[in-house]
Image: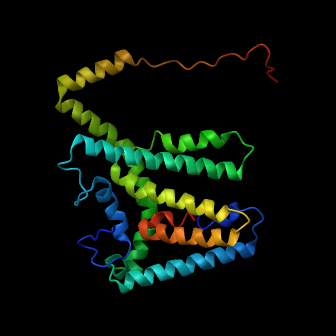
Amino acid sequence: MILLEPDCPVPRGCELKHGQLELAQGTRGGTLDGLEPRQVARLYAIAAAIVGLNVLLFYQLLWRLWPDRQFAPSAPLFFALFPADSCFPMLHINFHCRLAITILLLAVLAYLQGSPGAGRWRVCSYLLILVVLLYYEASFLCF
Amino acid sequence: MFLAVPLLAEGSSRADLKRHGLVLAVVLVSYVAVRYLTGDDRVLGLSLGPTGWRVLTNLLIGPYTSLSLFVHGPGLGWQWVSQHQPAGLLCLSFRLVLFQPVSATIDPLPPFVSSS
């Protein structure tokens, strides 16, 4: 289901980004006004799931790169719990930036996937990075 | 570091890095072309002078905003305290009573650790 924004009359990617919060809350508008506490709690649960998924993917990436290093378990926790990052309560950051990081990490993991089928994984990684570009451009350059 | 995923891959060569950059350039140009054809105002509004100036100044705006927070933050805090004197003084007194500064001391090395 793709929702079109009023300022985005044709499908070109921005509806992917702007539609996430609406899809999560099941309504149009993208704001929290008028939501029940249960609906807000559900949104924060989804945001926490996104952060948790990022932790797992980052851990998988570090473990693949440096399997014999002991910082592999602690670095993803620091990545998720970095105290100076005050954006964790902001839902739009979680639904935009952190979901883009999720796709970016998936693309990196797909790129680093070895044989068999390394070529297909590379193609898959470039398709994923195209999704990142459509979704939130800032994460593209990290790839 | 940008466009550097091939550096993470084991056994990647300079040719892999060039190929990676070429593929990403194709993806990026296609993306900009699609956005231009669909009338994206962010792409249509690009121009060499203002956009270039914005790119250059963005390198300074971010650090300036972060550093100025250390100047504005205490000022705003003191302004709030002066405007809400009872509540502000209460917060300050709690801060002073509950969170006494801890003197930093360096523990001596355990006897089994050599200092050399």
Q: Residue at x 26, y 45 (%)?
A: A39
**Residue at the image point whose x is 54% and y is 72% from the top:** A127
Residue B71 in picture, x, y percent from top left: 36, 43
Which quadrant holds the C terminus of chain A?
A: bottom right
Q: Nearer the viewer, residue B13 or A73?
A: A73
If the image is split into quadrants, where does the N terminus of chain A sit? bottom left
> On the rendered structure, is B97 left or right of A122?
left
Can residue A87 be seen here? The reply is no
Q: Does the rendering let one see residue A56?
A: yes
Considering only vertical position in the picture, is A71 above or below B88? below
Instruction: Decide if residue A132 is on the left or right side of residue B35.
Output: right
List the single residue furthest toward the bottom.
Answer: B37
Residue A69 vertical placement versus A61 (above, below): above
Expressed as whole percent of the image width and height from the top left, the position of residue A97 reads: 43, 57
In the image, is A100 to the left or to the right of A24? right
Q: Picture coordinates of residue B74 (x, y %)?
A: 33, 37
